[in-house]
């Protein structure tokens, strides 16, 4: 079974789930004094792990991370991140269901 | 921690955000409505109300830590030196929205009107010093942030729906 793709997509979905949560928090606290913007990092760390030249696959155990930036959240940026995350969720769920239907075809021998 | 809690704490957070803006809108319209209230039930002019938002727990602890470190004379300036950013495990399930309280502040302005029944010995009437333009701006801002929070709820719903379609 090819679980590597599914595993990666699983972690991507977890990232988007967390990001929706931090964005919701940033929006809820737009005018809370002293609040510092929260974000989730995963894609950049993944890219760095991919580019690193090592014998072992560094991307395998990579998990999303919550980060606290300095400074307050900005409304426009948060709205952008919200739609960005939504698009990424659509992409990931599409990729996942395609993957599963491929596996199903392999198991049953019937397309779809 | 149930994995469903991860999903549904978004709604808790956004609910707190919506509540905060609803209270802000309420206080602004109350201030506008009472701009000419020179006497309330306890005999004083109307006190201006303000919605005050407090940090969510996840960040309040951090701020507390920061205060402690400053007291010890070792203020951290670099984000990397900070005690810890909230992990997802501690974040999941709890709401990350603000806590909103209403605070009253007495700000008065005097108007000369000797025939007014509430006038003092010198003929001045005390009114709350409500800045109408400021209150209107607060109302618009609260409205917009309320909308932004609604969009976040919508996005979270959409995301859960997509996840169930896999």
Image (cartoon, grey):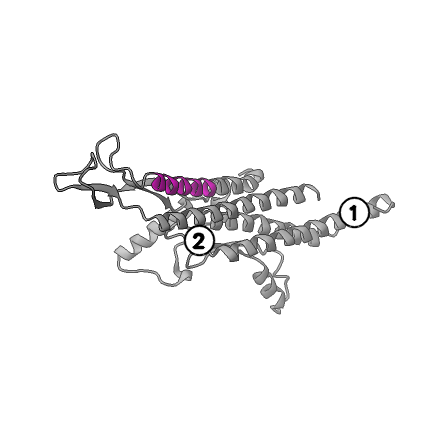
> How many numbered discs?
2
Q: Identify the mark at residue B85; answer none if there is no mark.
A: 2
Q: Is residue A54 visible?
A: no
Q: Is residue A43 visible?
A: yes
Query: Given the current orientation, which residue lies at the most extreme top position?
Result: B41
Per the rendered image, the range of residues in magenta is: B16-33
- Magenta includes B29? yes
Residue occupied by mark 1: A101
Which subunit holds the residue at mark 2? Answer: B
Could you tell me which secondary element the residue under label 1 belongs to? Answer: helix
Q: Where does the C terminus of chain B fall, quadrant-wise?
A: top right
Tell me what residue is drawn at x 41 percent, y 59 percent: A71
Classify residue B160 as left or right of residue B78: right
Q: Nearer the viewer, residue B146 or A16?
A: B146
Q: Nearer the viewer, residue B23 or B109?
A: B109
* x then y, percent, for residue B150: 54, 44
Residue A65 in the image: above or below residue B36: below
From mark 1 to mark 2, how far is it between C-alphas? 39 Å
Q: Which secondary structure class fits the magenta region best?
A: helix
């Amino acid at each position: 079974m090819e679980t590597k793709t599914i595993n990666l997509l699983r972690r991507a979905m977890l990232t988007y789930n967390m990001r929706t949560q931090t964005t919701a928090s940033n929006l809820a606290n737009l005018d809370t004094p002293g609040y510092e913007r929260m974000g989730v990092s995963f894609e950049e760390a993944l890219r760095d792990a991919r580019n690193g030249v090592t014998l072992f696959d560094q991307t395998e155990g990579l998990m999303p991370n919550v980060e606290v930036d300095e400074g307050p959240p900005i409304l426009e940026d948060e709205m952008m991140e919200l739609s960005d995350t939504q698009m990424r969720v659509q992409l990931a769920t599409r990729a996942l269901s395609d993957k599963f239907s491929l596996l199903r075809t392999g198991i049953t021998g019937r397309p779809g | 921690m149930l994995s469903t809690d991860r999903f549904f704490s978004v709604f808790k957070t956004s609910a707190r955000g919506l509540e905060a803006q609803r209270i802000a809108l309420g206080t602004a319209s109350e201030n506008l409505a009472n701009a000419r209230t020179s006497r309330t039930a306890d005999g004083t002019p109307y006190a201006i109300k303000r919605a005050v938002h407090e940090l969510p727990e996840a960040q309040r602890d951090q701020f507390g830590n920061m205060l402690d470190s400053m007291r010890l004379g070792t203020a951290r300036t670099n984000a990397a030196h900070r005690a810890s950013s909230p992990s997802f495990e501690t974040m999941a399930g709890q709401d990350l929205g603000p806590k909103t309280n209403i605070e009253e502040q007495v700000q008065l302005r005097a108007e000369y009107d000797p025939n007014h029944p509430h006038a003092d010995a010198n003929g001045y009437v005390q009114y709350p010093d409500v800045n109408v333009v400021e209150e209107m701006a607060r109302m618009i801002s609260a409205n917009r942030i309320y909308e932004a929070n609604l969009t976040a709820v919508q996005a979270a719903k959409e995301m859960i729906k997509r996840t169930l379609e896999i």
